[in-house]
């Protein structure tokens, strides 16, 4: 069954922010300029937020930040995480190296929503060089308003992802 993308995106843009959830955020130096506005937005929606750095545009290695962000998720101190780097690619690769993390690089609202609904994604990655803050806002709404499907079809697939982590 396919979702009518136009109807989905139209209703999603109007959707209010979901009830507050504990979030964790991090960025490398390239993502730092977008991280501040994203944090302000998330806080304005009422989400408790942990900032794992970086705290300036001084060069930092994104795997170090990804390790801190993913540790918060795995410890249960955050329900979901957000990583911002230049393209989002490096952050996504780093996140997916950590057992128990399912990271998705999303530069559109449909993928942000579907990644949670179908794949139980717990780490959203975005590229500050790729999208602007307005699109980031819509992506965040989609990511935070989505819930993992109760359909056995999707739950079976996510279980298989967990099995792959044991290889």
Image (cartoon, rainbow, N blue to C red):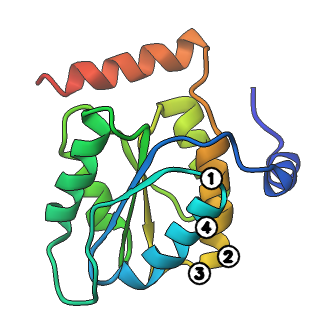
Q: Secondary structure at mark 3?
A: loop
Q: Residues within 10 Å of mark 2 (few under 14, many from 20)?
A: few
State the separation of the CA atoms marked 3 and 2. 6 Å
Please report contact status of discs 1 and 4: CB closer than 8 Å, yes or no. no
First in residue order: circle 4 vs circle 3: 4
Q: Residues within 10 Å of mark 1 (few under 14, many from 20)?
A: some
Residue 36 x/y as whole percent: 47, 77
Name the residue that disc number 4 marks: 41
Q: Residues within 10 Å of mark 4 (few under 14, many from 20)?
A: some
Residue 96 x/y as whole percent: 26, 46
Name the residue that disc number 2 marks: 134
First in residue order: circle 2 vs circle 4: 4
Query: Which of the numbered marks, if any, corresponds to residue 46?
Result: 1
Please report contact status of discs 3 and 2: CB closer than 8 Å, yes or no. yes
State the separation of the CA atoms marked 1 and 4. 9 Å
Please report contact status of discs 4 and 3: CB closer than 8 Å, yes or no. no
Seen in the picture, residue 4 relative to 126 is either above or below; the reply is above
Q: Nearer the viewer, mark 1 or mark 4?
A: 1
Q: Nearer the viewer, residue 12 or 45?
A: 45
Q: Secondary structure at mark 1?
A: loop
Q: Nearer the viewer, residue 70 or 56?
A: 56
């Amino acid at each position: 069954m396919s979702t009518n993308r136009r109807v989905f995106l139209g209703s999603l843009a109007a959707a209010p922010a979901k009830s507050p959830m504990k979030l964790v955020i991090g960025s490398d130096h390239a993502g730092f300029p977008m991280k501040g506005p994203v944090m302000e937005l998330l806080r304005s929606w009422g989400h408790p937020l942990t900032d794992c750095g970086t705290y300036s545009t001084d060069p930092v290695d994104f795997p170090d930040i990804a390790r801190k962000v993913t540790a918060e998720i795995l410890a249960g101190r955050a329900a979901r995480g957000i990583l911002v780097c230049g393209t989002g690619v490096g952050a996504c690769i780093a996140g997916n190296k950590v057992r128990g993390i399912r990271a998705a690089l999303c530069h559109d609202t449909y993928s942000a929503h579907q990644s949670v609904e179908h794949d139980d994604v717990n780490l959203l990655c975005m590229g500050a060089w790729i999208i602007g803050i307005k699109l980031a806002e819509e992506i965040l709404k989609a990511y935070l308003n989505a819930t993992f499907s109760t359909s056995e079809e999707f739950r079976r697939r996510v279980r298989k992802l967990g099995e792959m982590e044991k290889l």
